Image: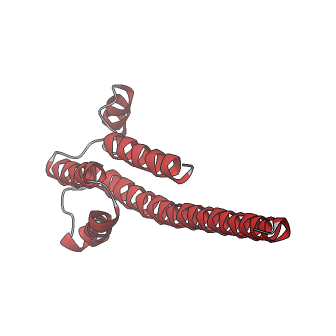
Amino acid sequence: MNSALVSAIAALAGSALGGVTSLASTLLGQRSQLRAQQIAGHTAKLETLYGDFIDEASRLHAHALDHNSPQPSDFVGLYAKIGKMRFLSSEAVVASGETVIRSIVETYLEPNRDLAQVRAAMENGALDPLREFSNACRAELQYLKLSSSK
């Protein structure tokens, strides 16, 4: 075989291999970047949803401390947010959100509290129905952020 032909074939094979390697590297990089963008978008949606739930639950819980007669329509926003969480979030987040709603309902059924009772409950940590929910949300968001950096 002619050495010039062998050299030409080797050069072409090297160029082809380099091109395939470059293409594969680019495709993998773009795929990884797209995945990270998707996770970032999902994380942003969850942060908004969880923040809205916390705002609404806090408002209702504060109302429940000095009122005994909620309107069922007061809970529509919370139930809608729990419904969204059922298809976007982990079971731990959904379960803790449902616990928050039950806690608010129980607070409405209890006697009204005055400011001194509210302060005493705050000092002994009994007035924080959102702690477990917040912790579950934080754990889920941290997991998503870690998985996007892989």
Q: Is residue 66 visible?
A: no
Number of numbered discs overlaid on the protein picture: 0
111 lies above or below 84: above
Return the x and y of residue 92 as percentages of the image width and height.
Answer: 27, 48
- Which quarter of the rendered picture does the N terminus lie within? bottom right
Indicate left or right for 150 with 6 as reference: left
Taking the view exactly as shown, the residue that stands out farthest to the top is: 124
Return the x and y of residue 54 as percentages of the image width and height.
Answer: 40, 55
Q: Is residue 91 visible?
A: yes
Q: Nearer the viewer, residue 10 or 14?
A: 10
89 lies above or below 73: above
Taking the view exactly as shown, the residue that stands out farthest to the front is: 1
Return the x and y of residue 60 as percentages of the image width and height.
Answer: 32, 58
Indicate left or right for 128 with 149 as reference: left
Asked where in the image residue 67 lies, by quadrant, the reply is: bottom left
Q: Nearer the viewer, residue 31 or 103?
A: 31
Q: Residue at x 35, y 44 (%)?
A: 136
Q: Nearer the viewer, residue 142 or 8?
A: 8
Task: Tell me the colour scheme of the image.
Answer: secondary structure
Indicate left or right for 52 with 113 as reference: right
Q: Residue at x 31, y 63 (%)?
A: 85
Indicate left or right for 12 with 77 as reference: right
Q: Nearer the viewer, residue 37 or 116?
A: 37
Return the x and y of residue 86 as percentages of the image width and height.
Answer: 26, 64
